[in-house]
Image: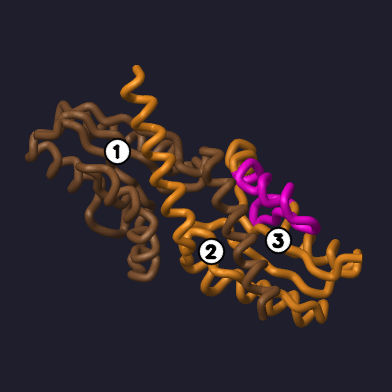
Chain colours: A orange, B brown
Amino acid sequence: MNTHKIILLAHGSSDKHWRDTFEALAEPTLNAISNSSIAYMELAEPSLDTVIHEGIAEGVRDFRVVPLFLAAGRHLRKDVPAMIEALEKSTGASINLSPPIGESPLLGQAIKEVVELHLGHETEK
Amino acid sequence: MNTHKIILLAHGSSDKHWRDTFEALAEPTLNAISNSSIAYMELAEPSLDTVIHEGIAEGVRDFRVVPLFLAAGRHLRKDVPAMIEALEKSTGASINLSPPIGESPLLGQAIKEVVELHLGHETEK
């Protein structure tokens, strides 16, 4: 039984195309890391609440939430910490919040590569 | 004289920490690609309007806007195309909108690497 779980937390949207993009973004991580899931802060399922409760039912006691956000705005500074505090209180689990993925220099490098690819395709036209 | 310009378009925020994160994300691209700039859709300067007008004053006639967004929501489907259409009409420049960076598989790979780094640091504790 795995007592740890990684949760990739996206904002959430009622728009399927938006969710599909986030599911594609999460896929390499979910494939590489056992006991990892995507969850949505609002407007879509599975919610953070759902994924935490499912994890606890499976015996998970330690969660790490990695925000699929480029930067920390109000949601990551206030709303998500408040949700986590409430879930820790109600479940007794430990839930750690990582910085948003956009704070890693690896993202800036990936952005540079994406832009260079766009430019490469343009000159091929 | 360079007649092309790349604009990395971020949402924008009145929060300096938020803008600093986006400026760090943009930095590798701005260093690698000549005649590239960051611009904000709202709430921060330089705005898209400012960067387009500065480019035109320098002789740029062809702009490519690359959204620093993980997925396309209402802003990228409606607001930004409307801003671009108005700017093309008022200036006569050509302004192309790329898909958001999050639609590239390179971002999903970078996210996996970021999460693996978080886990590596955790096990070192």
Question: Residue sitting at 33 percent across and 48 percent down?
Answer: B29
* Nearer mark to the viewer, of 2 and 1: 2
Q: Magenta residues, as a range?
A: A22-45
Task: Give the vertical position of A96 relative to B113 (above or below).
Answer: below
For the residues labelled 3 and 1, the Cα–Cα distance comes to: 36 Å
For the residues labelled 3 and 2, the Cα–Cα distance comes to: 12 Å
Q: Please provide percent x and percent y for residue A62.
A: 78, 74
Question: Residue sitting at 34 percent across and 66 percent down?
Answer: B20
Per the image, label 3 sits on a secondary structure element best described as: strand
Q: Viewer-proximal residue, A111 or B10?
A: A111
Check contact, mark 3 vs mark 2: CB within 8 A.
no
Per the image, label 2 sits on a secondary structure element best described as: loop
Task: Give the vertical position of A123 relative to B63 (above or below).
Answer: above
Q: Viewer-proximal residue, B50 or B89?
A: B50
* Nearer mark to the viewer, of 3 and 1: 3
Question: Residue sitting at 63 percent across and 41 percent down?
Answer: A24
Q: Is residue A40 toward the left or the right of residue A113 in the image?
A: right
Check contact, mark 3 vs mark 1: CB within 8 A.
no
Q: Is residue B101 toward the left or the right of residue B120 in the image?
A: left
Residue type at tag 3: Ile
Q: Please provide percent x and percent y for residue B123.
A: 70, 74
> Which chain is mark 1 on?
B
Residue topped by disc 1:
B83
Residue topped by disc 2:
A100
Quarter holding the C terminus of chain A is top left
Q: Please provide percent x and percent y for residue A96.
A: 67, 75
Q: Mark 2, residues whose alpha carbon is within 10 Å: few (<14), some, or many (≥20)?
A: many
Residue topped by disc 3:
A7
